[in-house]
Image: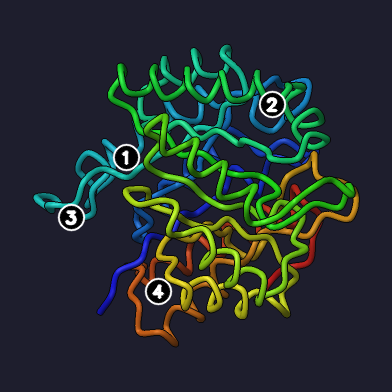
């Protein structure tokens, strides 16, 4: 059975919520994700609390998560079952500037730095207040600093599937960005449909058109979607060759800087359903996943004021 990488994204699910989720609850939630079999978690971000209040406690969340994993029965250094051979989970911390990088590198347990690089000038300014040159310079610094610190780096190409700002876009722009990332030796990249406007056809077509530009790069997708189109988009990416998928349980959240008509994350449940049809194995324990889903619905009810998802 073919394996795929499934990246669970509580950080993306929570970052736009106004009601603050308690630090201990966040850490407990992520421990449940590890217990359910998630090996890659987009967990925290190191950004200004003035702009993303929900992530103001990232260092504290990681401290509590590290302690919880080390003390939990059945876990050893973040691994399921004592003596297991699987590596500790990848924990991704998002940064958008040098100050965030300094904080992330100083936080134990953050194994990978994530950086959203936008090919939309308007969104780049709204999200990080940077020019294209400043953003590229930062990406190069991130690569150098993470390599020196023995941390991973994943770059997200924001607005990879187009933008609503009437700005130039096309597969050639995405391909050029991938060539540049390859040149600076970034080895993990995710194509992000930041505002959820891509059709399943576009998802598959773009992935096929640019994948030959990234020999040596693991190329994933971070898609947003309305529920009725989610499974089609995942299958389109999979059939085009993608084996790395970002998602969030129940489809909660998305980028708060993308506009009022935000389309949320693709629900992890939809990804699992789609992958089952292909015969791929994401390695998630259905029984343990139930607890994480219960906690997600509690967050929806208490902090997102959103309907529960069955």
Question: Regarding mark 4 in the picture, which secondary structure is present there?
Answer: helix
> Which element type, helix, strand or loop, lies under badge 3?
loop
Q: Is residue 176 left or right of residue 134?
A: left
Mark-to-mark CA distance, 2 and 4: 43 Å
Task: Answer above or below: position of 88 versus 52.
Answer: below
The residue that appears at 87% across and 46% down in the rendered structure is 259
Q: Which mark is residue 69?
A: 1
Q: CA distance from mark 3 to mark 1?
A: 12 Å
Tell me if label 2 and label 1 are in contact, CB under 8 Å. no
Q: Are marks 4 and 1 in contact (CB under 8 Å)?
A: no
Q: Earlier in the sequence, mark 3 or mark 1?
A: 1
Q: Position of residue 160 (x, y in %)?
A: 66, 51
Q: Are marks 2 and 3 in contact (CB under 8 Å)?
A: no
Q: Secondary structure at mark 1?
A: helix
Mark before the other along the chain sequence, 4 or 1: 1
Front tag of 2 and 4: 2
Q: Which mark is residue 286?
A: 4
Per the image, the residue denoted by label 2 is: 132
Q: Is residue 157 left or right of residue 194?
A: left
Secondary structure beneath label 2? helix
Q: Earlier in the sequence, mark 2 or mark 4?
A: 2
How far apart are the two marked residues, 3 and 4, measured between alpha carbons?
A: 17 Å
Q: Are marks 2 and 4 in contact (CB under 8 Å)?
A: no
Q: Quadrant of residue 120?
A: top right
The disc, 2 or 1, on the residue closer to the chain's N-terminal end is 1
Between disc 3 and disc 4, whose residue precedes? 3
Residue drawn where x is 35% and y is 52% of the image: 215
Farthest residue toward the left?
83
The residue tagged 3 is: 81
Answer left or right for 267 relative to 284. right
């Amino acid at each position: 059975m073919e394996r795929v990488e499934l990246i669970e994204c509580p950080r993306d699910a929570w970052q736009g919520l106004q009601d603050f989720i308690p630090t201990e609850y966040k850490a407990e939630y992520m421990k449940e994700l590890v217990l359910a079999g998630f090996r890659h978690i987009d967990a925290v971000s190191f950004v200004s609390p003035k702009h993303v209040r929900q992530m103001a406690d990232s260092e504290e969340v990681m401290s509590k998560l590290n302690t919880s994993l080390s003390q939990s029965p059945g876990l050893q250094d973040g691994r399921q079952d004592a003596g297991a051979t699987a590596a500790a989970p990848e924990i991704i911390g998002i940064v958008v500037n040098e100050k965030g990088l300094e904080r992330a590198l100083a936080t134990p347990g953050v194994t990978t730095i994530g950086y959203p690089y936008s090919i939309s000038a308007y969104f780049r300014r709204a999200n990080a207040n940077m020019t294209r040159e400043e953003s590229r310079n930062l990406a190069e610094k991130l690569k150098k600093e993470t390599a020196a610190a023995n941390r991973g780096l994943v770059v997200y190409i924001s607005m990879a599937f187009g933008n609503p700002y009437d700005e130039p876009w096309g597969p050639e722009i995405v391909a050029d960005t991938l060539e540049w990332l390859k040149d600076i030796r970034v080895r993990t990249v995710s194509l992000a449909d930041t505002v959820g406007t891509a059709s399943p056809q576009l998802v598959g077509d773009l992935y096929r058109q640019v994948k030959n530009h990234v020999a040596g790069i693991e190329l994933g997708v971070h898609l947003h979607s309305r529920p009725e189109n989610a499974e089609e988009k995942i299958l389109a990416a999979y059939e085009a060759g993608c084996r790395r998928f970002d998602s969030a349980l129940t489809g909660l959240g998305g980028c708060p800087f993308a506009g009022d008509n935000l389309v949320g994350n693709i629900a992890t449940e939809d990804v699992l359903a789609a992958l089952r049809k292909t015969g791929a194995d994401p390695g998630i324990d259905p029984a343990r996943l139930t607890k994480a889903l219960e906690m997600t619905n509690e967050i929806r009810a208490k902090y997102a004021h959103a309907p529960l998802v069955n």
